[in-house]
């Protein structure tokens, strides 16, 4: 097994015209990994202010068939969810991810809603989750797994409603990763990667069947994003 591995790596080094993995090469690799050098970032994202990033995120998300509603407070979430469910003739039952960021939502304001905290099952048509971040440059949501935050809740319900704070919208993927590193770096400097990081851009879709776009083939057929801007710009 070791001989096969060495042979494969040797072939790769020769094709790349690289030497062996000596101390210098290993140190260079460690430095490169620690540096987190950013790749090319589109100017359309980096040159925008906070409001510009919010507007760009919405435009890019809507371009891929997601829908977006702006709210002034988490207190407005129950009414917005109830309106969305009524608009699409959906049941009032929903599964809500056990995300501490969602705990302040006053679901009791809409007694007709029946939220259930926990893990989604095949019977759940509507799921409500939070998000770790959102990327303005592509209209993409960044969701991470954690205690109580089951990844299946992002994909199993046919209708995915995401509660997103405006300040979670970042210009680029690189900044999203930087926020995650800052959150998950321990006091000894070690980074603890979440088990799962999902990037979601619009509802699930495929064109495998007769080259026709079909929504909901591998996940939710609808993605609705509630942007809560409780600290708006002056």
Image (cartoon, rainbow, N blue to C red):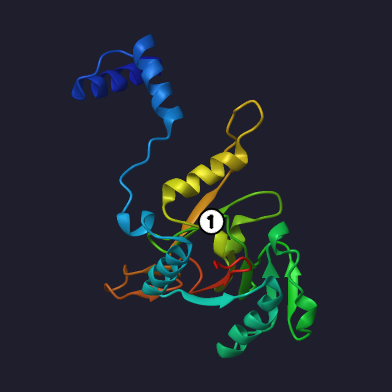
Q: Is residue 68 left or right of residue 149?
A: left
- The x, y position of residue 67, in whole percent, is 48, 77
- The x, y position of residue 55, in whole percent, is 43, 70
Q: Residue at x 58, y 68 (%)?
A: 232
Q: Nearer the viewer, residue 219 or 102?
A: 102
For label 1, the SS is: strand
Q: Is residue 17 left or right of residue 167?
A: left
Q: Residue at x 38, y 61 (%)?
A: 138
Q: Residue at x 66, y 76 (%)?
A: 77
Query: Residue 119 is drawn in which quadrant?
Result: bottom right
- The x, y position of residue 29, in whole percent, is 38, 22
| Quarter of the figure that contains the N terminus | top left
- The x, y position of residue 226, in whole percent, is 57, 72
The answer to whether residue 145 is above or below residue 75 is above
Instruction: Give the farthest residue toward the front.
Output: 234
Query: Badge 1 is on which residue?
Result: 133
The answer to whether residue 115 is above or below residue 129 is below
The answer to whether residue 9 is above or below residue 228 is above
Instruction: Give the farthest residue toward the top.
Output: 23
The answer to whether residue 50 is above or below residue 174 is below
Tell me how many marks there are.
Answer: 1
For label 1, count other residues whose C-alpha is less than 10 Å away and answer few (under 14), some (14-19) or many (20+): many
Residue 154 visible in the displayed image: yes
Residue 99 visible in the displayed image: no
Q: Nearer the viewer, residue 42 or 213?
A: 42
Q: Nearer the viewer, residue 204 or 224?
A: 224
Q: Residue at x 57, y 55 (%)?
A: 132
| Quarter of the figure that contains the C terminus | bottom right
């Amino acid at each position: 097994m070791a001989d096969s591995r060495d042979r494969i790596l040797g072939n790769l080094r020769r094709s790349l015209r690289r030497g062996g993995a000596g101390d210098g090469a290993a140190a260079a690799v460690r430095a490169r990994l620690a540096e987190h050098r950013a790749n090319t970032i589109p100017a359309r994202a980096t040159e925008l202010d906070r409001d510009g990033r919010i507007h760009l995120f919405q435009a890019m998300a809507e371009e891929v068939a997601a829908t977006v509603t702006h709210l002034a407070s988490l207190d407005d979430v129950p009414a917005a969810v109830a309106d969305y469910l009524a608009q699409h003739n959906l049941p009032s039952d929903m599964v809500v991810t056990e995300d501490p960021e969602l705990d302040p939502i006053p679901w009791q304001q809409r007694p007709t809603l029946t939220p259930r905290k926990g893990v989604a099952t095949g019977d759940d048509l509507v799921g409500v989750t939070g998000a770790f971040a959102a990327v303005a440059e592509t209209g993409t949501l960044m969701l991470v797994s954690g205690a109580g935050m089951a990844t299946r809740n992002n994909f199993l319900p046919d209708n995915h409603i995401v509660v997103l704070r405006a300040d979670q919208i970042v210009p680029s993927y690189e900044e999203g990763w930087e926020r995650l590193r800052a959150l998950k770096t321990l006091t000894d400097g070690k980074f603890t990667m979440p088990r799962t990081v999902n990037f979601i851009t619009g509802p699930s879709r495929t064109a495998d069947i007769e080259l026709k776009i079909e929504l909901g083939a591998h996940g939710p057929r609808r993605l609705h994003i509630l942007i809560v801007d409780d600290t708006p710009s002056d």
